[in-house]
Amino acid sequence: MTRSVPFSTGRVRRSALSQALAAFVLAALSAPTAPAAPPAPEPAAIAQELRSFGEFGSVLYIAAHPDDEDTQLIAYLARGRAYRTAYLSLTRGDGGQNLLGPEFGDTLGAIRTQELLAARRLDGGRQYFSRARDFGYSKDYRQTLAKWDKEQVLSDIVRVIREFRPDVLVTRFPPEPGGTHGHHTASSVLALEAFKLAGDAKAFPDQLSDLKPWQPKRILWDKYNFGRGSPDDSAPGIIHVRIDGNDPVTGLPLLQLAARSRSMHRTQGFANFWVAGSGSGPRVESFKVLAGSPASRDILEGIDTTWNRVPGGSEVARLAVEALAHFDAGNPAASVPALLAIKAMLPALPGDPVVDEKRAELDRILQSCLGLSVETVVSRPDIVPGESVALRSTVLVRSGVPVRWLVVRYPEKTCAAKDAMAVGVASSVKSTWTLPADTQPTQPYWLRAESTPGMFRVDDPSLIGRPENPPAIPVEYILEVGGQKLVLEDEAVAIDFGPGSAQTRRKPEVVAPVSLAFGSPVALFAPGSTRKVEVEVVSYRAGAAGTLRLDAPGAWRVYPASQPFHLAVVGDRAEFTFEVTAPAAQESCEIAADADIGGAHFENQRTEIHYSHIPPIVLQPPARLKALSLSLAIRGRRVGYLPGAGDGTAASLEQMGYDVEQLAGADLTSTRLRGLDAVVIGVRAFNTRADLAAHLPDLFAYAAAGGTVVEQYNTPNNLQAQPLAPFALKLSPNLPKYRVTDENAPITLLVPAHPAFNQPNRIVAADFDGWVQERGLDFASEWDGARFTPLIACSDAGEQPLKGGLLVAQVGKGYFVYTGLSLFRQLPAGVPGAYRLFANLVSLGK
């Protein structure tokens, strides 16, 4: 990165971003014709839509996390039986670890949201969420409900039930406490309570302005337990459902389709799940009724799943059956008259949310049978609030059925369209549209406001439950077929014109004219010291000019107060240096970056996340720096860092003053390690790296020759390399037993005089204050007591103290450390004591 002269406007440099954006805009605006229309659905997909239209059965599956859902059941119900099927995940999985990259916390939650949506696109289900946060492992559901706002989560479940209106609820876990995650049990406890409240008009009456009470028929526990033994088939009151058959759309066995769906949970290591599960044969799923109407043969037993349940719907039911029976895969347009006859009957039916949903579904089926493609393309991939953009809406009809295009509607704007459509000829309407000046930059709605450790804050109730934001530019096409109006809802897309004729469609983003970024999320200061803090400004509009300042609270001081900037070209970057002086006392604060452009203030950074199995993700949270005024000493200078499953430990080491060298497994040789003061191994490296095993003897020899090795936690499952240490050390498969989930659990220093607690920093009990999410996980369960010295003891309430969270062994002239303490979370969170302890571990023997 090019550095600027201190207190100047910075050196501006052109970037690949500026070239890419310029090329995108030029291609989009100069394209002589409309881009290729999306292909028409395959006949098998249309037939499946017809089946779905004729079915009213609906199931809502409820559990706690991404990957908790039973994709086999969802695929069977949604694809095999064409029922309305949805999964309500109470959390977005933001408290877990990421096996693909460095993202965790809220960013990981955004990734796992998209992984769930990718899974649902495969298995045919829908996706919902509550506002609950995944705050890490919980050993007891009462602990979970104490951290979540129970009433808010309960309200969210009731809201989803009232909106989706399922016939039955299915929980993944039993409501009785057991040897599982507290979130798991809490999800079923709350689902059972919500089942009893959703139909009560006195419960959560604030929802009834736009929803109506709804009482499902029954709630069941899905006893499928991921292959760890079969339920007792002879137990009374158990319903058995055979999961079998092929997907009507793809022809794949449903169990293989479900395995592919599950493979979308790749941040959790399920990338190859579909390969392992592709050969699975038919299986029987078992269910237990928890409340509601009894059943013994099927989970929807006794429920009319046809249009006959709607007053006046019997004729619709008959015509829907006939339309499906006479559907001609070779000529889908032949079904249009029958579908129009059904459409003409719907206005006379009583108002009902599911019937309204079926009306829109029928319009989509007509669209498919007509071979009708619609698309609106926006002229640029990002839009600044208050900015006008060009829109081009295109309609193409592939069948010979006469279609009139009446109007196209954008937010607060309606454009007349071309009337009669010629077969196979695309018709377009061009317009301009202005994004309202008060539109917020693109950011997942649940991340827009400050949250608590247990709950996201969502100020707009209409968003609660939704998996993602509403479209930035919603579009509605109004057409006429056979004298009836056809209403098609869509959203504008941006098209990236690649080499040749390649086109990539993406959602447009609302962006600020500039983004801001600190060089590091955490900055360490010696008390009373002054250090330079860099802020990078990136332009997303040509000629972006304004004033950059840092806002620091209390006794923290910033110089200069502000700096002007001017970036001529889109994608230009400039780095600005401020001098920040910490107070004499040890304390922490948040420093905010702010760009003033013509009186408008922009504080957002920009993060783009790209993984091949999900769409690109753009996050624009506030640009903040966690500043610590901290007495911290280190010994040694050069540290090698071997990445594991992804964390920010290397950046934290650099903030502490170390020169960090990135290592691979092949670098663990005596020659390469010579001269390093310490080697730090990233979290779950032994689980995720295949290049460690052959080089462990050299790593241990490095320690024996006087080096220090700090190994962060691993899990006992799927170890790629062993042994974990130069001396005997084991991890227990009973993971809950060997983790401490309470981040405030008391810590006992077992050997207060040990160098790890005294050199070069004095560690006291207060250094364990302010920790986040947990104390640690995957503590060692067994170790060589003659070699390893346990340094701490801690436990969750009511449990025996665990001593395997921090083990130190002297190896020849050096040291080997194994720690399950979640330092990888504490360091980027700016926990002062974690830095002091980590410095001591890295400094052992120096």
Image (spheres, grey):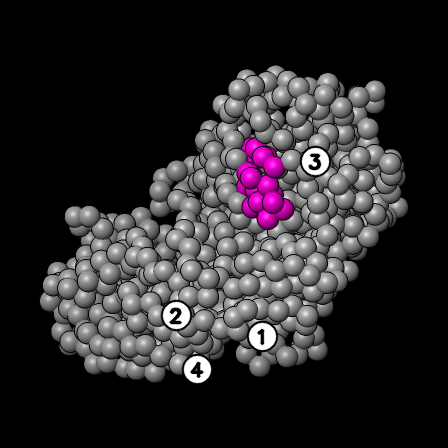
Disc on the earlier residue, 1 or 4: 1
Q: Earlier in the sequence, mark 3 or mark 1?
A: 1
Q: Relative to 114, is 583 above or below?
A: below
Which stretch is magenta?
637-660
| Of labels 2 and 4, the one closer to you | 2
The structure residue drawn at horizontal position 61% and vertical position 60%, both measured from the top left corner, is 530
Q: Earlier in the sequence, mark 2 or mark 1?
A: 1
The alpha-carbon separation of the residues under discs 2 and 1 comes to: 34 Å
The secondary structure type at the circle numbered 2 is strand
- Dot in front, 3 or 1: 3
User: Can the viewer see residue 827?
Assistant: yes
Tell me the kind of residue under disc 4: Gly
Residue that carries the numbered disc 3 in the rendered image: 843
Q: Position of residue 760 (x, y in %)?
A: 75, 41
Q: Helix, strand, or loop for circle 1?
A: loop
Residue occupying the point 53% across, 59% down: 533
Which of 599 and 10 lies nearest the eye of the viewer? 10
Residue position marked by numbered label 4 in the rendering:
599
Q: Which residue is tagged 1? A: 459
> Is 730 contained in the magenta span?
no
Residue 565 circle label: 2
